[in-house]
Image (cartoon, helix red, strand yellow):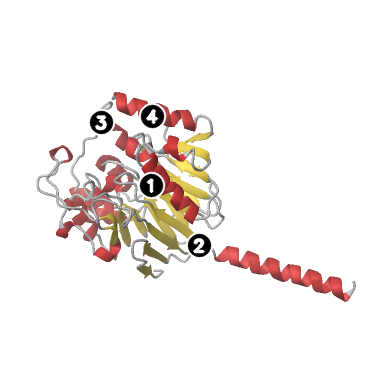
Amino acid sequence: MPRRITLFFALVIFVTAVVVGAQSKKELEIYSIDVEGGNSVLFVSPSGQSLLFDAGNPGARDADQIANAAKKAGLKQIDYLVISHFHGDHFGSVPELATRIPIITFVDHGPKMIETREASVNAYNAYAAVRDKAHYMPVKAGDKVPIKGLDVEVVTSDGVGIAKPLPGAGAPNPLCKDAKPLVENEPGSPGAEDGRSVGIVVRYGKFRVVEFGDLTFGKENALVCPNNLIGKVDLYFTDRHGLAAGSPEFVHALAPRVAIFDNSARKGIMRDSFMTVKSSPGIEDIWQLHYSVPRQANPNLGETGDQGGKDANTADENIANLAEQHTAADPAHNLQISAHQNGSFAITNERTGYSKEYKAH
C-alpha cells in the first residue's frame, strides 16, 4: 500500500478515535425547567436521545420555556415525552409544544382519565389529539422506556407500583412501623389523577435520579414499606411540587443527596415537606425553581399554618428564580444538572451561573 494512502487511513482512524472519545465523555444532562408551578424535566442521554418528563401548563409560555431548553441542549426533537398524569400543569402545553419541536413517542399511564370536570376532560382531549397522531406507548410498573444510553424504569403507573425491588434495593424500612394508614383520593375527585402518576427511576452508571410526578402519600409509601423497593438515590425531584406528599418514611428511605423542589412563588413547598427533606439522612443540599413567598395556609392540602417565607426556603444561590413575577429584565431561569457514570454530578443555577459539584460516593 502506498505511503500516502497509509497516512490517509491513519488520519481517518485518528480522527474517528478522537470523535468517539469525545462522544464517550459526554454525560447525562438534565434541565429542571421553570414552568411556573407545573412540572417539566428534560433528560438528554449521552447517546443524544432525549426524554421530557411532563410539559407544564397550557399555553405558549411553558411551551416556549421547554422549547428553549431543548434548543440549548442542541435537540432537534423530543424522542420520548413521559406524561406523569392527566392534570393540566403536567401536560397542558403539549398542543403548543408539538408545534415548536417534533415529539416522537408519547408515554403515559393510559387509559383515559377518570376525572369528570369539564376543564380536565377538555384538556385531556386536546392532549390526546396530539398524542394519538404520534407513536404511543402506554406503560405499567416494571416497563422500561428504551432511551439509548440510560436505564429508565417505570416503578409506578395507574395506581400500581412495582412488586420486586430494583437492583441493590429491597431492604426492610424501619420507619414503616410508625407509619399511619393513608387514604387515597376518591375516584373522580380532583386529586384522583395524582395517585395514578407514572414514576420513573433513571440510572446512568452509579447515578440514580427519581421523578414521580404528583404521586400521593399512600402510593409513595407502597414503594418503600415494608421494604424499600427503590433504594437510595442521588437526586430527588420532589413529588407534588413539595406540597402534600413526601412522608418521612418515603423520603428518608430514598436518602437523596440532593432534592429539587419544582415550585412556583406561591405553589409548592409546604413547610412540613421542606423540613422532611431537610432532615433526611445524607441530604447535602436543597435546590428550588422559585423562592417561596409567604402565603396563607390551604386547608384542602392539610396545611394548618402559614407557608413560605425565609424558613421554608433554601439559600438564594440555590434558587433559580427569586422574583415573584418574571420581567424582560429578569426572565425565567432553569436549573441544569450534569451527571457522570461514577455517581458524581453538578448543578448550575442559570440565573447566576453558580455551580456546585457533588463528588461520587
Label 4 sits on a secondary structure element that is: helix
Q: Earlier in the sequence, mark 4 or mark 1?
A: 1
Residue 166 shows in this picture: no
Q: Earlier in the sequence, mark 2 or mark 4?
A: 2
Residue 336 % position (x, y): 40, 59
Residue farthest along the bottom direction in this orientation? 3
Q: Rounded to the nearest whole Å, what is the CA distance between mark 1 and mark 3? A: 21 Å
Q: Residue at x 44, y 62 (%)?
A: 338
Q: Rounded to the nearest whole Å, what is the CA distance between mark 2 and mark 4? A: 35 Å
Label 3 Cα crowd, 10 Å radius (few <14 / some 14-19 / many 20+): some
What is the three-letter code of the residue carrying label 4?
Tyr
Residue 255 % position (x, y): 30, 59
**Which residue carries the number 3 mark?**
190
Residue in front for this viewpoint, 254 or 121: 121
Label 1 Cα crowd, 10 Å radius (few <14 / some 14-19 / many 20+): many
Q: Rounded to the nearest whole Å, what is the CA distance between mark 4 and mark 3? A: 14 Å
Residue 161 to residue 275: above or below:
above
Quarter of the C terminus within the rendering: bottom left
Q: Rounded to the nearest whole Å, what is the CA distance between mark 1 and mark 2? A: 20 Å
Q: Earlier in the sequence, mark 1 or mark 2?
A: 2
What is the three-letter code of the residue carrying label 1?
Ser
Residue farthest along the front direction in this orientation? 328
Q: Earlier in the sequence, mark 3 or mark 2?
A: 2
What is the three-letter code of the residue carrying label 3?
Pro
**Which residue carries the number 2 mark?**
27
Residue 124 - label? 4
Q: Rounded to the nearest whole Å, what is the CA distance between mark 4 and mark 1? A: 17 Å
Residue 40 - label? 1
- Relative to 1, 237 lies left or right: left
